[in-house]
Amino acid sequence: MEKNSLPSFETMMNPTLQALRELGGSATIEEIVFKVSEIMSLSDDELSIIHDPEKSGRTEIEYRLAWTRTYLKGYGLLENSKRGVWSLTAKGRQTETVSSKKVSRFVRDQRKKTRVIKKRQ
């Protein structure tokens, strides 16, 4: 099983939103990983691929889902109220599905704007 055959972080955006809705709007990282893998029918082989064996035991799916959560947070759909717990925002509860390309473009544009502002200071 190759890393490049795994779903991208963008592909996991809507399953993440679905998982959080099914989990009552809030869940731990572990619960989200489990539910998304169930929704996407990921195999044990896919779930066992380690992202960077020399640095940690975190799986590639866990790594990509971390980016998924980061982008959904940047888009205003998720928040992490306390360490390791993620929740749908009011906007997230009202959002059934998203265009992953639109979310990515929005978050990247926001990061560029932030960098430009920091350089000017």
Image (tube, grey):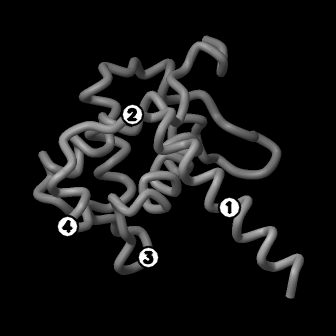
Asked whether, in this view, residue 76 is left or right of residue 48, the answer is: left
Tell me the distance, in whole angstroms, between the alpha carbons under discs 4 and 1. Answer: 23 Å
Secondary structure category for the residue under label 3: loop
Under mark 4, the amino acid is Ala
Amino acid marked by disc 1 = Arg
Q: Earlier in the sequence, mark 4 or mark 2?
A: 4
Assess disc 2: are there few (<14), some (14-19) or many (≥20) residues with their C-alpha within 10 Å of its C-alpha: few
* Number of the label disc, if any, that sits on residue 83: 3
Ranked by sequence position, the earlier of labels 4 and 1 is 4
Q: Measure the C-alpha gap from mark 1 to mark 2.
A: 19 Å
Amino acid carrying label 2: it is Ser
> In the drawing, what numbered circle is on residue 111?
1
Residue wearing tag 4: 90
Image disc number at residue 99:
2
Query: Disc 2 to disc 3, how far (Cα)?
Result: 27 Å
Relative vertical location of residue 101 with respect to residue 20 in this rendering, above or below:
above
Residue depth check, mark 3 versus mark 4: number of the one nearer the observer: 4
Task: Name the residue: 48% across, 46% down.
Answer: 68
